């Protein structure tokens, strides 16, 4: 769950950055298109002004008609600060708005010097300046050269564009809390910026980021600003037909802010659900473990005698069937011994049931000690016990029965009253070869018969059938 969530969140982060890059690229394209279109319109007006100014007859027309010929198209320019014809000395020869400007020479402006020095400049886009004709307002000028009939310099046609045009264009762009958008000349001179900082207008941007923009026509990259250290995604494009560069730079933090909020929510929910899932899994695991333990305990209780700790009759039946089948496959013998405590009822009557239980437990311990590890000792019922002897022939069964009998007889601390002998047991054994046929129950019945024979013969002895014909061997 965590891996899938992290992969999804990482993909979401990349998608957010890609989407922001696409949006910034689209904004740059729109800004560039608007600038290019308006510069193209202004250039058409300039060409018309140059064509009219270079015609000698234009200057012979009445002033109203002359101005209409020179400035007809220029009147439609957006944020137009003024349209002028400057003479070869840089003074206003004629202006569109018919205002009487002071005799100020503008021959020191970069746009005038560039046109004066070269007849091949064409359209010139000036650096920003504070106008001497319009109360120091920030402007840029688009100019074209006016020639005499012999090709010599005769002045320039000027369209002054207020910088408010660029600022109003950028004001419609959403930059986010820490983003920025700006328009600059190719050399880095800033024309407009959002957020607006007046003292930055006209300054030249000097940074590695802008150096990259100068060497590429368009593109997108992420970098930290040298001014404020904010990491931004810069999308830029050169405006066709102009020296302008349009740049949209949203802050990476602003771009990723919605993604971070979603990631925090999703991550928290994933952590919570994962924790609950793990906790529930552990609870289920512990519950299942406890259930298995209880089931195992119930199985043990179902197959175990509570008093002696020995297996019970149910366990004997299961073990006998399994060993019988194994002996039948291997061709080996299998034996069973039945053991009964002699005169146990009388012992109970003399000492009580509590002492009788102690005797039963003690006898169970003697039988277990005398048996082999592979033998199965069970409490068959009451004071009767049974021992399953796998891989044991008649002689082995008799020997095992005798060991058990002697072990019980040695418990002198349970002697009866009035000089009665110690606790003793009678043992009846039977042996079969399952490979010759028969059933496990027949073996139990045969051993039980030998037990009754041992009791009838005087108790405290071991008896075993010699053959299936019913003759016996008696050990005392």
Image (tube, rainbow, N blue to C red):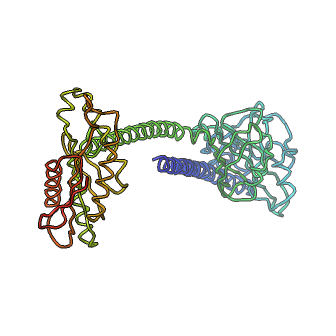
In front of the other: 58 or 316: 316
In the foreground, 90 or 13: 13
What residue do we see at 69% from left, 59% from top? Answer: 217
Q: Is residue 205 left or right of residue 284?
A: right
Residue furthest toward the front?
419
**Is 142 displayed left or right of 33 in the figure?**
right
Horizontal and vertical percent position of residue 290: 35, 39
The image position of residue 184, as x and y in percent, is 72, 46
Q: Is residue 350 above or below residue 97?
A: above
Q: Position of residue 398 (x, y in %)?
A: 27, 58
In the rendered structure, the answer to whether residue 277 lies left or right of residue 23 reads left
Numbered circles on residues, count: 0
Q: Nearer the viewer, residue 66 or 459?
A: 459
Q: Nearer the viewer, residue 205 or 434?
A: 434
> In the image, 203: left or right of 79?
right
Coordinates of residue 425 in the picture (x, y in percent): 24, 45
- Depicted 282 relative to depicted 370: above or below: above
């Amino acid at each position: 769950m965590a891996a899938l969530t992290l992969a999804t969140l990482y993909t979401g982060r990349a998608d957010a950055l890609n989407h922001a890059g696409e949006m910034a690229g689209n904004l740059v394209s729109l800004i560039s298109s608007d600038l290019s279109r308006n510069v193209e319109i202004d250039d058409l007006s300039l060409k018309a002004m140059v064509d009219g100014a270079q015609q000698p007859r234009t200057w012979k027309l009445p002033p109203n008609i002359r101005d209409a010929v020179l400035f007809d198209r220029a009147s439609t320019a957006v944020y137009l600060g003024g349209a002028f014809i400057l003479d070869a000395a840089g003074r206003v020869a004629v202006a569109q708005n018919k205002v009487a400007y002071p005799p100020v020479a503008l021959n020191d402006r970069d746009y005038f010097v560039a046109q004066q020095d070269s007849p091949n400049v064409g359209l010139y886009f000036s650096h920003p300046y504070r106008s001497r004709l319009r109360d120091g307002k920030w402007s840029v000028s688009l100019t074209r050269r006016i020639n005499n009939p012999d090709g010599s310099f005769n002045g320039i046609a000027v369209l002054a564009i207020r910088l408010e045009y660029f600022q109003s264009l950028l004001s419609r762009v959403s930059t986010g809390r820490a983003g920025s958008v700006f328009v600059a000349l190719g050399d880095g001179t800033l024309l407009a910026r959002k957020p607006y900082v007046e003292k930055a207008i006209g300054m030249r941007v000097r940074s590695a980021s802008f150096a990259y923009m100068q060497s590429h026509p368009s593109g997108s990259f992420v970098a930290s600003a040298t001014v404020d250290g904010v990491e931004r995604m810069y999308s830029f494009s050169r405006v066709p037909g102009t020296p302008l560069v349009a740049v949209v730079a949203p802050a990476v933090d602003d771009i990723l802010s919605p993604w971070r909020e979603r990631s925090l929510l999703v991550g928290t929910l994933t952590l919570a659900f994962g924790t609950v899932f793990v906790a529930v899994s552990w609870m289920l695991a512990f519950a299942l473990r406890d259930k298995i333990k209880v089931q195992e305990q119930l199985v043990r209780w179902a197959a175990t005698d509570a008093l002696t700790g020995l297996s019970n009759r149910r366990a004997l039946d299961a073990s006998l069937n399994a060993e019988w089948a194994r002996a039948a496959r291997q061709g080996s013998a299998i034996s069973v011994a039945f053991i009964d405590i002699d005169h146990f009822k009388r012992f109970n009557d003399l000492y009580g049931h509590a002492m009788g239980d102690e005797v039963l437990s003690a006898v169970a311990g003697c039988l277990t000690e005398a048996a082999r590890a592979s033998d199965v000792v069970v409490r068959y019922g009451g004071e009767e016990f049974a021992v399953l002897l796998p891989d044991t022939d008649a002689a082995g069964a008799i020997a095992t029965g005798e060991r058990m009998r002697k072990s019980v007889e040695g418990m002198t601390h349970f002697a009866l009253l009035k000089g009665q002998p110690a606790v003793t047991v009678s043992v009846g054994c039977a042996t079969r070869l399952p490979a010759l046929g028969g059933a496990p129950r027949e073996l139990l019945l045969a051993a039980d018969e030998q037990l009754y024979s041992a009791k009838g013969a005087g108790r405290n002895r071991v008896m075993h059938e010699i053959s299936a014909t019913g003759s016996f061997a008696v050990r005392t």
